[in-house]
Amino acid sequence: MRRKVIAGNWKMNMLPNEAIKFIEELSAQVKNTSNEIILCVPYTDLFYSLLTVQNTNIKIGAQNMHWEEKGAYTGEISGQMLKSIGVEYVIIGHSERRKYFAETDETVNKKIKSALQNELKPIVCVGETLEQREAGNHENIVRNQVKLALEGIQSEQLEKIIIAYEPIWAIGTGRTATSNDANEMIKTIRNEVANLYSEEVAQKLIILYGGSVKSENSKELFSTSDIDGGLVGGASLKPDEFAKICLSV
Ligand code: PGA
C-alpha cells in the first residue's frame, strides 16, 4: 500500500508570523494522522517554519531551487542551501515556473538530479494545457514530460521522488479534473514509469493530483486507485480547510 501524501503549496503567500500561526493551528488538528503532510513555503518562511514544525508530523519543503551548488547566480538558492537548514522536500517544475520563469524539461531534470544529490526529495510537477487536452495530446505531452524529467535518474532514486500531475487548466481556476480523468492520467504516468523502469518501481511511486483541490473534492480524488494524495494551492492557505483535506482519507 502506498502512503497518502498531502502537500500544500503556499506559492508567494504568507509572512513568517502568518506561517508560524498557521503551523500551530494545523499541527493541533492533524497530529493523529498517518498521512504524510508537507508544507511548501516561500524561502523567507523556511527557517521559521522548520522551527515551528519541530515535534509535529508536518514536513517542510521549498518551492524551487537552482541546480548548481553555488556561484554567480544572483537571487538563486541551491539545493545545498536548502538542505543545510533542514528542508526535506522541494517542488520542481511547477507550471507557474515553467510559464513565468522559463523553466524547461531540461532544467527540471537538472534540478531533480541536484536535489537528489543534496538528499532533498523532489515533488516534480507535470501537466498539460487546455489546448493540449482539447487537441487530444495530453497523454503524450505528460508521458514525455515524465520521461525527460527522469532522464538519467536511477530506479532506486525513484523512492525519493514524488510526481504531481497538475493539469494547467485546473490550477487556481476552480475547475477540477474529474476524479476519473485525474486517476486515468495518473495511471498513464504510472504506466510510463513502468516502461522506463519496472512495474514494481511504478507501483511504489507516489503520484499526487493538483489543481483546485479543496475539502469538498479531496476525499473523492484521493480514494481512487492511483491518486496518492494532492498538491494543494489556494486551499492550503487556511489551516482549517487544509486540515480537512489532510484528514479526508
Ligand atoms: P490550486 O493550485 O490548488 O490553487 O489550483 C495547485 C498548485 O498550483 O499546485
Image (cartoon, rainbow, N blue to C red):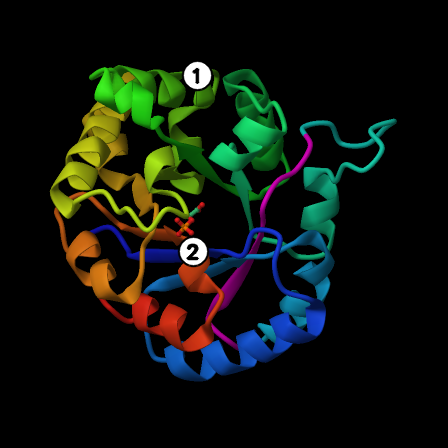
Q: Amino acid at mark 1?
A: Leu
Q: As drawn, is 15 to the left or to the right of 179?
A: right
* Screen quadrant of the C terminus: bottom left
Q: Considering only vertical position in the picture, is 50 above or below 83?
A: below
- Magenta segment range? 55-66
Direction from residue 181 to residue 155 in the image, left or right: right
Q: Amino acid at mark 2?
A: Ala
Q: Position of residue 195 (x, y in %)?
A: 24, 17
Say what secondary structure mark 2 lies in.
strand
Residue 173 left/right relative to 64: left
Q: Ligand 1 near label 1 (Cβ, under 8 Å)?
A: no
Does the rendering let one see residue 232?
yes
> Along the line of sight, which residue is nearer the eye, 124 or 132?
132
Residue at label 2? 7
Residue 21 shown left or right of residue 219 in the figure = right
Q: Mark 1 — residue?
A: 148
Residue 144's spot in the image, x, y percent? 35, 15
Q: How many marks?
A: 2
